[in-house]
Image (tube, coloured by chain):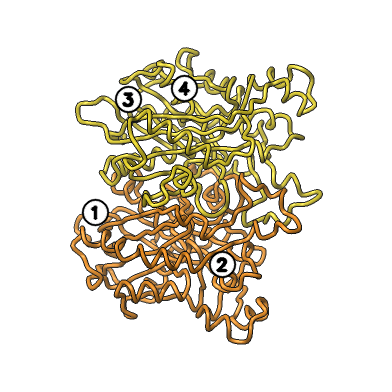
Chain colours: A orange, B yellow
Amino acid sequence: MQIRNVKILGTGKYLPARRIYSDEMDRRLGTPDGWTLRKTDVRVRHFADGETASAMGAAAAEEALKDAGLKLSDIDCLVCTSGTAEQPIPSTGSLIQKAMGGEYSGIPSFDVNSTCLSFLTGFDLLSYLVEAGRYERVLLVSTEIASVGLNWNHKESGALFGDGAAAVVIGRSAEEEESRIICSRMETYSKGARYSEIRGGGTRIHPREHGPGREEDFLFHMDGKAIFKMAAKLLPSFVDKLLRPAGLSMADIQHVIPHQGSAMAMRLITSRLGISQEQLVYITPNHGNTIAASIPMGLHEAAVQGRMKRGDRVLLLGTSAGLSLGGMVLVY
Amino acid sequence: MQIRNVKILGTGKYLPARRIYSDEMDRRLGTPDGWTLRKTDVRVRHFADGETASAMGAAAAEEALKDAGLKLSDIDCLVCTSGTAEQPIPSTGSLIQKAMGGEYSGIPSFDVNSTCLSFLTGFDLLSYLVEAGRYERVLLVSTEIASVGLNWNHKESGALFGDGAAAVVIGRSAEEEESRIICSRMETYSKGARYSEIRGGGTRIHPREHGPGREEDFLFHMDGKAIFKMAAKLLPSFVDKLLRPAGLSMADIQHVIPHQGSAMAMRLITSRLGISQEQLVYITPNHGNTIAASIPMGLHEAAVQGRMKRGDRVLLLGTSAGLSLGGMVLVY
């Protein structure tokens, strides 16, 4: 058990203006009316329209700073915790710093990437630096443009995703405060490394190889069944290893904020892990799967809706490409 | 000052078999005989030839494990600390775990990216988790294939880089051991975010936009003069802020292991920071700039050559795209 006296100081989100409703998605995918909504439970997702990921991230970050009553100069470290990058070089963290007007700030800015679990991984890592006093306040930003890399021939995955950004400011919790991180855990089983991937665009398949017949190499590929099978098998014991050393069971958790991978994944975790509808923070219907922004967006929604209150125990939980499992229990 | 009782347990490196000597580089660039060597001081660099970054990283990691007398199952966390990614999804960390045969290992695996400073950033971050007891032993792997993204029309940058991988195992240092991290620091000035970049390949410019007239968007672009000017201005005070709180001056350091950005950058840091030839670990002539693998490769070379001994004070130092500056002082 690794208690860290770290708390969430503020949250923010940004969604692009352009809304894609499920009926528009049906037309885009060539599916019968109602197919998208029935399959995915996503009524509306937002798609970026000329916006950059760094501008979206900066907007979410500004809102999180405002929520925390802070300004950029109060921040000691900026970490982009996204599953996608705006460009290969430099880090998206640097580009977010620039978009926030921090060109001369000197704030250390870099990226942490574990695909859909990037926020959780970044939060987990940086909490140790906040606890140790290296940084007082850290800005975590997840900003995702999924829509450019979707494969419209693969209806099951194409219908799931939305674009958006979310940001969280973390800082040290005072002695008398309840807020803290109770425990966190991550596991990666690369047996599933190819179950969800974009093969092209990095050093293995350079963009110059894009062309007729190679398009799919540069689009998101997902073997939903294989992921579901592997996650279903691994999740119960993962959650047990997360909660048990902290003396917790699922009944001790007020809010479960999962990575909103898909409606199917949500049903899996609620049924296999004994999570009630009252515990579950479910934002899939009006966001879709926003990759790594999904968990901080759920945190933001639970906070602004007044549903999550100081002192509540919160479980952040998800799976990602890799295949990785990640979880954290915190007192908000 | 942030002392961490963390030590380097082992190091490894891997260079692809294919060697590109400076005369071959002259022919490739269309420069006069001797130009590459005179400009870059790189006699030979290695270029990957069909190898993947994850396979290269796994080879370096195996050597580091062997050096530390460990096997993969002794590792609690695997972090890919590269400036380039093998593919956009999943993380290169997962792919390295797979290449090492760790498919069912469950070892948490993810990426930390601050371009050329990724190793330093990852080492810095994870040292806090080792110090706190979250992970006992962490494997850091930097694996870079620069050669696929170089712009041969831009001779100054094209001539600089080499491919390669390096890995370092870190773990907790026992009470009675001298080995520890004394201090570390990072600063990012996004004023320089566009001084070195690859614009295309992420969400801003998707690979589908690759085509005639757009090739350079997907290749490395560097404004060497602007970087040099900014780094020259920022480095002296950065190093002062790193060393002074620890009560150290450059004379207290036995080995300076810089990011081998270019021979020009090496001259800059030695002249401006008062680093002697005896202190400098200089591996540019037979490696080139291997992006984030450059610093751990220097560490490996200094260790295997017997030059760096337990108890020696070592300064890791560099700049990266972002523009970031990073430094760490450790007792080996």
- At 18% across and 62% down in the image, what residue appears? A247
- At 50% across and 63% down in the image, what residue appears? A291
- Amino acid under disc 1: Ile
Specify the label residue A163 is tagged with. 2
Q: Are marks 3 and 1 in contact (CB under 8 Å)?
A: no
Select label 3 or label 1 by which is in front. Answer: 1
Q: Which residue position holds label 4?
A: B301
Dot 2 alpha-carbon crowd within 10 angstroms: few under 14, some 14 to 19, many 20 or more: many
Q: Is residue A68 shown above or below B281?
A: below
Residue B160: horizontal and vertical position, in percent?
Answer: 64, 28
- Mark 1 lies on a secondary structure that is loop
- Is residue A214 visible in the rendered image? The answer is yes
Q: Which residue position holds label 1?
A: A3
Specify the label residue B290 is tagged with. none
Q: Nearer the viewer, residue A32 or A258?
A: A32
Gap in angstroms between the C-alphas marked 4 and 3: 28 Å
- Is residue B229 visible in the rendered image? The answer is no
Left/right of residue B165 with respect to residue B183 in the rendered view: right
Question: Do the residues at discs 1 and 2 belong to one chain?
Answer: yes
Q: Which residue position holds label 3?
A: B247
Q: Nearer the viewer, residue A179 or A91?
A: A91
Figure quadrant of residue B246: top left
Q: Is residue A19 shown above or below A75?
A: below
Residue B271: horizontal and vertical position, in percent?
Answer: 54, 18
Gap in angstroms between the C-alphas marked 3 and 1: 32 Å
- Mark 3 lies on a secondary structure that is loop
